[in-house]
Amino acid sequence: MSTLLATAVGVLYATAIYLILRRSIVKLVIGLVLLSNAANLLIFTSSGLTRYAPPLIPEGSDTVLNGIVADPLAQALILTAIVIGFGVLAFAVVLIHRAYEVVKADDMDQMKDTDT
Amino acid sequence: MLYALLGGFGVAALAPWLHQLFGRHSGWALALWPATLFIYFASMLSGVNDGPVLVSHDWIPSLGIQLSFMVDGLSLLFALLISGIGVFIVAYAGRYLEQHQDVGRFYAILLAFMASMLGLVLSDNLISLFVFWELTSITSYLLIGFNHEDAAARRSALQGLFVTVGGGLALMTGLIMLAMVGGSYELSTLLGQGDVIREHAWYAPMLALILLGAFTKSAQFPFHFWLPNAMAAPTPVSAYLHSATMVKAGIYLLARLNPALGGSQLWLTVLGSVGAITLFIGIWLALRSTGIKKVLAYSTVMALGTLTMLIGLGTDIALSAAMAFLLAHSLYKGALFMIAGIIDHGTGSKDLRDTGGLFRAMPVTAVTASVAALSLAGVLPMFGFVAKELLFESVLSSAASWITLLVVAGTAMTVAVAALIGILPWYGKTAVTKRTPHEAPPALLAGPIVLATLGLLFGLFAPLVDERLLGAAVSAVAGNSVTPNLALWHGINVALGLSALTLALGLCLYFCRDQFRHYTRFTDTLAKAGPERGYDASISWLVKISAWQTRFFQSGYLRYYLLIILLTFMALVWTVMLIHWPALSMGIDLRGIQLHEYALVFVLVAAALAAARSESRLGAVASLGAVGFTVALLYVMFSAPDLGITQVLVETLTVILLVLVLFRLPGFLRLTSTALRLRDAMVASAVGITMTCLLLFAADARLYDSISHWHVAQSMPGGYGRNIVNVILVDFRALDTLGEIFVLALAATGVLAMIRLRAEDKSK
């Protein structure tokens, strides 16, 4: 399964970078969202995929059943990354909206001055 | 010892304030500091024959760098020259720059320089030696550019800095190599390792680097050009840094390292020939110049060449000659530079051709100048004569014949230069000068008189100087005990004959100086194509290249920055992967994948491609949502329920946000050509393939065990929580989460601020 997901991660990276290289700021933001998904999935896949064993300790026990669970550390990192990614996105979206109001253009090549 | 050195920086820091306190007498007041140092160092003279004194303080003990000092004959000779001449320079500067508004700053830099120079000659540790070495370069830069409103001064200062600091970089590499070869950073240890160092395979490159440092500092050919330009500095600076002390730092280093590096054929060849060439070119240019300070500067180049050559020859007599020459030169050149300043100060003339007959107006200066010039010319009974005799004896006994010829010719021309300084301005027809010539005040005269008189006394009592001062210095340079046998009268021999010959030749040259200048005009065109032109060319190339690379890399377009970063990333990753290619294997394994998993990944890929290809904003956002929710499903399927929940929540908010904001923006335009799109698509695909490959390689290699066992085991007993991911977030890695909260708060503040800003704009 990780082979299949590795391919999907590659496609996500490729589309994200293609969009980030555009001149349109909206496409840049969409690329940014794709990039953060790609990175999260990359970490998720590389930590090893486990089916039907969430990192939860059942009621009445001090440790997990039969000792095999999905890697909780990678999940904790990704959880942080998802939330931070959203914060960055919210900021970026409001920023470009504000920039658009001032510059009246979606084209980054028209946003070269620092004075406006 | 530490206080004597670091105290200098303290006095330097206080100098501007002291200057305000003492007003016009601040020169004399501040001169007390070098005078104290001089007495302190002089008190060490008697003990120095018993071997070097070592003092050590920890500086950066973890790196083995110590602030350690060594006092032996050589360092003491330099320390005495630096502090002794420093006394008169500081007093002199007080009068000379009386009218200048920034005298306080001047004192501060000059005293900081003095402290750095003392640190340089007394350092035992190579690193601290290098630090002081660079400090002298920096203070010298500040002093040359002291009149910073003058473009020529700024240019000269920068030129001096580039040349000496460039050499300093080479020197640092060389010194580190030396320490690695010799196994210690302490000079006192290294000096005994000469045989090991000379046999080592690194000897030649190490020597080349160290010599580059020494040659640039001491203005050896082809780096001699910066020194005359440094004469843009105020005269006390020229007298002190660029004749008596700083330029001799390179000489000091050569002499200091002679026991460790010297004695090889390479050393002899390089130092001997570079020194001899510098000697000749220096004195040739001196004779062709007419500016008083230029003449003196070029004759300093000649002296530095002589010293380099003598250290290169390395015989006992050559080293004795070097030390005697060094002492004599410091005395007469310091005096002559200060006299050049007096002429400038008293008459407003900077050119020899504008002077003449000044004896009547300033008799004391005139006599002092003549006495110092006699020492420069090497006339009996001055100390310069003693040094010159030794110079002749050492080249006659051990140098190649072409070097001997250059030395004899150079010495004859030195006589002519000495006559230019010692006779021309003072006697003969009275020249019309800008100001009415007047005798200099005592503060200006004290230095030249004392230094010139010392030149005479040292000559008369040469054996005493030998015993008390130079013997220990020569022994330190040679690495074993040497008695120089200085004497005014060595009997009638070849050296004496050469002395007489050069004296006669030099005087002839002096009287035919106009013809000489006329017939040697052709060298001016040669000089134009000289090393200074190389310097200018390399500076202009440097500027051009940096302008070009700035334009190239700092284009201002986000996509070009990204392209550079991505291409660099891929180049580095693939280099490493190809190096380790045989050891890598891809963990391709398609077994056990269920149909709905294939379907899910297919949706993910299709949605991502649709988002990239979409021509409409709505299509792009919808595809983005599809990608996000598919990823959430994947999280749920592979045992990450928390991630799934969060992803669904965030994805919903993202889509809402994008829909709300993006639709206030204009629709997509086709901004780039198909060719550019193709290029970006290729780069993007390459990055995608790289990431896939990385992931596949990584899946098949686990170098270290996961540390999450600990988290799983400790979740309940340590964190009292059944959801391990949550325990990690709020307990084991709580500080990370706190940081995350701060980031979110910051982002929220930013968002709020921008929305508020917009509201205010509208309300206006």
Image: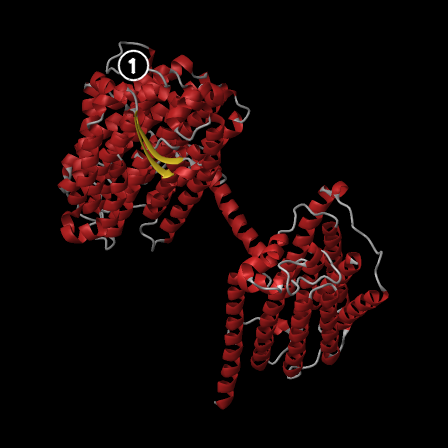
- Residue positioned 83% across, 60% down in the render: B593
Whether residue B754 is visible here, answered yes or no, is yes
Name the amino acid, label 1: Thr
Task: Depth check: give the residue in front, B292 or A114.
Answer: A114
Residue B225: where, in percent of width, then height? 42, 39
Q: Residue furthest front?
A: A60
Task: Depth check: give the residue in front, B51 or B363.
Answer: B51
Q: What's the chain of the residue with tag 1?
A: B
Residue B643: where, in percent of width, then height? 66, 67
Residue B690 lies in quadrant: bottom right
Residue B563 lies in quadrant: bottom right
Q: Secondary structure at mark 1?
A: loop
Residue B14: where, in percent of width, then height? 22, 49
- Name the residue carrying label 1: B483
The answer to whether residue B383 is left or right of residue B280 is left
> Compared to B173, does B260 lie above or below?
above
> Compared to A70, does B521 lie above or below?
above
- Residue positioned 50% across, 29% down in the render: B206
Whether residue B329 is visible here, answered yes or no, is no
Residue B707: where, in percent of width, then height? 62, 51
The answer to whether residue B545 is left or right of residue B587 is left
The answer to whether residue B12 is left or right of residue B213 is left
The answer to whether residue B686 is left or right of residue B473 is right
Q: Quadrant of the N terminus of chain B?
A: top left
- Residue positioned 22% across, 33% down in the render: B84
> Compared to B471, does B697 lie above or below?
below
